[in-house]
Structures are given as structure tokens and as C-alpha cells.
Image (cartoon, grey):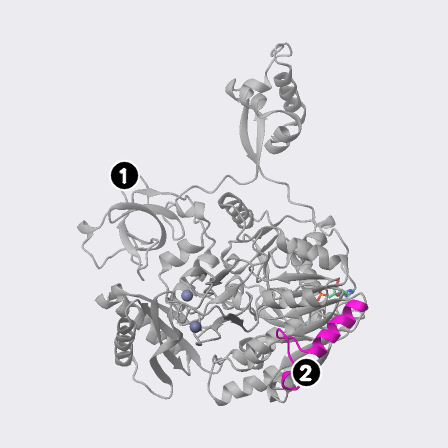
Amino acid sequence: MAQFEPLIIRVAVPSPLRRTFDYLIPENLGLTLTESSVQPGCRVMVPFGKREVTGLIIELGNNSEFALEKLKPVSQLIDARPLLPEPLFKLFIWAANYYQHPIGDALFSTLPVLLRTGALPPPQGQHCWQLTTHGKGLGADSLKQARRQRALVELLQDQGPAVAEDLILQTFSRAIVKQLEQKQLIEATFVSLPSSPTSNMLKQDHLPLYPSQQAAMDQIDHHGFSSYLLDGVTGSGKTEIYLQSIEKILRYDRQALVLIPEISLTPQTEKRFRDRFNVPMVTLHSGLSDRQRLDAWMQAKTGQAKIVMGTRSAIFTPLKAPGLIILDEEHDQSYKQQEGFRYSARDLAVIRAHQENIPIILGSATPSLESLNNCDNQRYKHLVLNTRAGSAVQPDWRIVDLKAERIESGIAPSTMAAIGTALNNKQQALVFLNRRGFAPAMLCHQCGWSAECNQCDSRLTVHRARHRLICHHCDYQQRIPYQCPSCQSQQLIPVGEGTERSEAFLQQSFPNSKVIRVDRDSTRRKGAMQEVFDTVNSGEPCILVGTQMLAKGHHFANVSLVAVLDADSGLFSPDFRGHERMGQLLTQVAGRSGRGEIRGQVLIQTHQPEHPLLELLMTQGYGNFARQLLSQRQLSQLPPFRHMALIRAESNRADQAESFLRLARQLAEQVCVPSPNLAYLGPLPAMMEKRAGRFRYVLQIDAEQRASLQHLISQLGPQLENHRDSRRLRWSIDIDPQEL
Ligand code: ADP
Ligand code: ZN
Ligand code: ZN
């Protein structure tokens, strides 16, 4: 067998280029090649242009397309062992290929910030102080003049190493510790945490499962890879199944990775996990400091943290002994990153579970059509929970025909009456409108002028409390004008409804009840969401009015009425996923009602009371509604029955984006001629053609076989990247796009 003697290290660096860079293995480091530090997955410092950057070794090679004397040596090896465990490292490589995204950017945009700069991971374990040899031998009559220092030495002599934070926070000041360190009597050390014994890992006992839960649980094999779709209405007890599955794998001393859409919106979920288990748990979310994020990441990597909870990017957390992945609300759009590295955390979670050879549970009350289809073709096992846990029953849905009523501020009199009844019965009402601000447009009553954004194809939204007109697409802002800029008339009227207007109208109509608005504007302040939960959980009668922030997994026991003010916007979306999204959103909002003892009521305001899809959703529930949509998708050959990719381009010159995509199409057709198996559409203007001053175009490619699409894109990506026109504008590849 020929001896493989690597000469070259192929390194991924943070760069937008779809390639790795070759470096020589430095001789002066005195390393033999068998030494562990030159391994894929280790970080290195390398010269890159005029700078030194941190890179990650992707592979070793013994040849290069460049002359060896032109290559530069690696300047420094940072890690002695791979930073990422092998299955995770492979996941990155897989994802960079699949999403046709530069591997360096994929890696470095998801690593904790402190590791991107080459800092060493902190020593593992707890920061402690212990006596030096000198300190251990300190005679009884030393330090007579320094009683506090003496006391600390004695404490360490009696007890052994002590946790730094406890020492400083509870007993000794930082100064005392410092003085002893300067005298070289004590030194810092790291002591690994004793892993918690498995006997008392439960803080609370698990609940005895209901028969439907038990049936689902019995089908889950906790050893080896398999994917499950846990399809259960809101409140049917999915979380209890997650908890009991985690308990099972904790007993084999494995770790669980739990992904949820948004942590700050649903602190209750995190709390339920913490309340149940007596094991170390970390949560990764956007509110962490760089240091906290690195610490959590290290605790996951070293196996100290047994439960790792996080949002989308937590799918890239290293785990020492993974045993289970749970992904809650699997239909949620937040799992797809919509810029840069456009990965789907849900799809990667399934790939990762496969690579780690562990089970994955995807849960939802409103599963995506992709996942339902994966059940149909036997890729996932479909576990169904049909009834609500305990006494809570499914809410009762009714249509409010807007054509038949005199609407004021977007709310029909019969809806108002139902809200009044709920309040009289000492219950809470939730009013849903997926549009923030006071009104989505402002018009001149005299001449018809309307306030538009100069940078986007869109109207400015009136925010009355802030006296501003704001573009929701580029965040352009201006004061609300006193008169029409076109005819100087002062009759400027806000048209249409946003949450701010509904709030004002409801407060005026129910002056004795609390009206709480929940949207991105009202919850910007830290702790604002917690105040909302506190009020709602106190049970006092109130009206909640808000956007989809209210639809997310909350448990509001005393909400008995949900009113959806505008179902029509969902019926007429131009996106082929519009109906699916509408069904999910309405079902999720409806799921907030009647979770306690009372039967909830859901009112749907619409101008289309006979719309067949709305009727199907209301009378037969999301499951049948989704089946119907799925067969329509099959008939019209749309995802998940075809595989789609978009090439997007945007430029401040309208013709530039379009002509770049025309070029992309020509290049693509040279690789793959159009056929029923692989079709091109476009270039077309994006749904909002002008946004933030840029003109946006898309080229859609769809294929019957995923493999043919992958083949094409993997050739097209580098070709486009190398084309000189690509440097003049922004462009990107979006595989399995979620938004058109
Ligand atoms: P989901 O996650 O599907 O919305 P949950 O797991 O939150 O449902 O369950 C809804 C409610 O029912 C919770 O208050 C939960 O504590 C309770 N519950 C779930 N399973 C059981 C059970 N087996 N026994 C008693 N209560 C249960
Ligand atoms: Zn005017
Ligand atoms: Zn704008």
C-alpha cells in the first residue's frame, strides 16, 4: 500500500468564496504528520491576502493545483484536537455542499464569536482556587498579621479546592484572594463538575401517560436513527412525550438537543424542562454574551450539559454523547435562515440525527406539508395525538361574515358582543391581527395621494403613538405630515387597521378592562413580554390584541375567545405556501383558547364565508385541510413533489440584476437543458421588486429529482462565482426556498 504523505492542508477561511485554500505544513513546528494537531477540524492561523486569519482544516492532501513553491505555510496551529466532533464536522461539509454555500462562511458564521478569532476554548470545569505546595506546607504561625488570608488558607487546607465564585461572592473578598495568589500560596485551577447521579435526575416525577400518549411513546425506539413526526393538537401532551423521551436517554447518560422556534416568546417551555430535570441544562439564544455562549457551547461539547436547548443555530452545537434530537413546532418558518447561509435547521436536524445514529422527534399541531409527505413515503413515522390532555376540549369555530355587518375599526359588532360576553364571564379574549402599527396606509382625502416609501414598492405604515410613518421593509421613517405634500390639504386619513388601532378602539369600547397589545413594537423593551405573561397568568379578565407573536405555543388557561380579524389576507397570498401558512396560523391562534376547563370559541372574520378551504379547515380540522393542499400540490407539481432552488440577485440598477440572472440561466442550460425533469422559470421580478433601494429578481429552477437539481447547482454555483459580473451585485442561492 502506498504511503499517504500529506504535504498540503486545505483550509476553510471566513470568505465568500466557494472553496478551500491550500497551505503547506510548516516544518519549523517540529511536528510529525501523525501528530494529532494536523487533523481535519482543527483551527489554524494562516496568511490570507494581507491579513492573518483563523481557518479550519478541512482535509489533508498531497497535491495542489498550484505550484508548491507558491504556497505559504500555516503560521500557527491553534487546536491540539479537532474543535468539532466528527459527525458535526461532516454535517457542515454536507450542508455547505447541499446549500451551495461557502464552507468557510458556513463554519465561521455559526461558531461562537470567541472561537472565530482563534481564542482557545476555556478550560473545562469550574474555576477553583487550591493551595500551592508552598501553601499546603504553611506553618500554623504564619500570616498572623493577616487574619482573613489565614482563614482562607485554613479553609482550603480543610476542604481542598473551592469554587472561585462561591469563595468570592460569599466569604472572602477578591482582594484577599489576590494577595494570597501574589504570595504564591494559592493558585487557580479547574475542577470538573461531578456528573449528577442518575438516581435523582428527576426533580418532578413524570406524569402517567394517557393511552394516546402511551401508544405514541411505545412506537419510539430510543436506540439508533429513526425520525418521528409527533402530530398532536395544541395541548394534546406532546411536551410530556418530549420530557419522557429525554428521561429515557438520560438514563443511558446521553444528551438531548432540543430546538424551539423562539425562546423569549415561550419562557414556559424552557421552565417546564428545568422544572422536570435535575441535570445541567444550557440554553442558547440571542440574548447571551459572547462569553456565556462559548461557555454553554463548551458545556455541550464536553458532555457536562445534559440538555441543550436553543433556537435555529443551536443545531450546530457539538455534543459529546448525543442521544436524541427534539424539534418543536417543526412547521415554524424561523427554522429556515433567510439570509447568508440559508439552511433549514429542521432538515439539517434530520441529517444530523442520521449521522449521529440517534432518534429525532419533530413535533407540531400543524405539521408542514413536507413532513406529512415524508410520513407518506415512510421516511418519518407518523405519531398522532388526537385529543387534548385532561379535560380541555377542542374549541368551537364560527365564521363572522364581514359582508353582512357594519364594521368599525375592523371589528364586527357580533365580534364585539362576544368579547363583551367573555369579559362578563371573567374570562380573557385574544384578538389576532397580523399587522402592526396603527394603519397600513395614509391617504389624502382631497387628491388621493398616498404615503409611499421611496426605497421600496410599498406604502408607509402609520404609527400614531410615535407620530411616525414607517416602512416595514427598510425601516425608513419620517414624521407624520400635517398636510398633503401634493395638494396641501390637511385631510390626511389613516386607512385600514393595524394592532395599534384595534387596541385603541377596544380600549375605548371596554374602558373598564385592561387591553394589552403584543407585537414587535410593544415588546421591544426587555421584560415587556414577561409582564404580559404575568397579567395573563393572573387570570384577570382582559383583552389581548396582537400579531403572530400571540400564536406561538403559549399556554393561556383563561382565554376563552379568540377573534381573527382578517382571515382574507391569508386566502389571497400570491405564494404557493400561502394557504398552508394560513391554516397553520389560524389553527395555532385558535389553539390558545380553551386550554383550561372552559370550551373555547374561535371567531373568524372574513369576506369569503363560503371559501372551500376555510370551510374545510373549520369543519374538518388542520389534518384534512393539509391532505387536501397536499393533493393540490401534487397535481400542480409543486414542492414537496418537486425540488426547488432560487437564484436571487439584487442591485441598485434594475437591469443589472435581471441580466445577471439571464446569464445564470444561459450557463445553467449549458449544464442541463430544460426538460420536464428540470425546468427554469424567469428571471422574474421578486414579489416586491424594489426594496431598500435595490431591484430584486429571481430565477426559479425546479426538478423532479433532487439529485439532478443538486448536480446542476453544484456546477452553476462556482461558475457564477467566477464570472466577473457576479462581483457587481448581490446574489445568492436558496435551496428549498420557503419564501418566493
Ligand atoms: P402540547 O405540548 O401538545 O401543547 P402539553 O404537553 O403542554 O401539550 O400538555 C397540555 C397540558 O396537559 C399541560 O398542562 C400538561 O401538563 C398536561 N398533561 C400532558 N400530559 C399529561 C398526562 N399524561 N397527565 C396529566 N396531565 C398531562
Ligand atoms: Zn392631497
Ligand atoms: Zn422601504
**Mark 1 or 2, which is nearer the eye?**
2
Q: Quadrant of the C terminus?
A: bottom left
Q: Nearer the viewer, residue 659 or 219?
A: 659
Callout 1 environment at 10 Å: few (<14), some (14 to 19), or many (20+)? few
Residue holding disc 1: 28
Nearest to the observer: residue 153 or residue 583:
583
SS assignment at label 2 = strand
* Figure check: 211 above or below 57: below
Q: Secondary structure at mark 1?
A: loop
Find out if the beta carbon at label 1 lies less than 8 Å from the nearest ligand 3 atom: no
- For the point 80% across and 68% down, which residue is it? 424
Q: Front-most of 181 and 622?
A: 622
Residue 216 in sight in this render: yes
CA distance separating discs 1 and 2? 77 Å
Q: Which residue is found at the position 70% from the left and 78% from the top?
A: 413
Q: Quadrant of the N terminus?
A: bottom left
Left or right of 623 in this view: 726:
left
What segment is highlighted magenta in the picture?
A: 402-424
Q: Is residue 238 visible?
A: no
On residue 399, the disc is 2
Q: Considering only vertical position in the picture, is 122 above or below 560?
A: above
Q: Would you say residue 407 sits in the magenta stretch?
A: yes
**Ligand 1 in which quarter:** bottom right
Percent position of residue 353, x then y: 54, 64
575 with respect to 499 (left or right): left
Task: Indicate the position of residue 73 as horizontal and vertical percent values.
Answer: 26, 46
Q: Earlier in the sequence, mark 1 or mark 2?
A: 1
Residue 166 picture quarter: top right
Q: Quadrant of residue 547?
A: bottom right
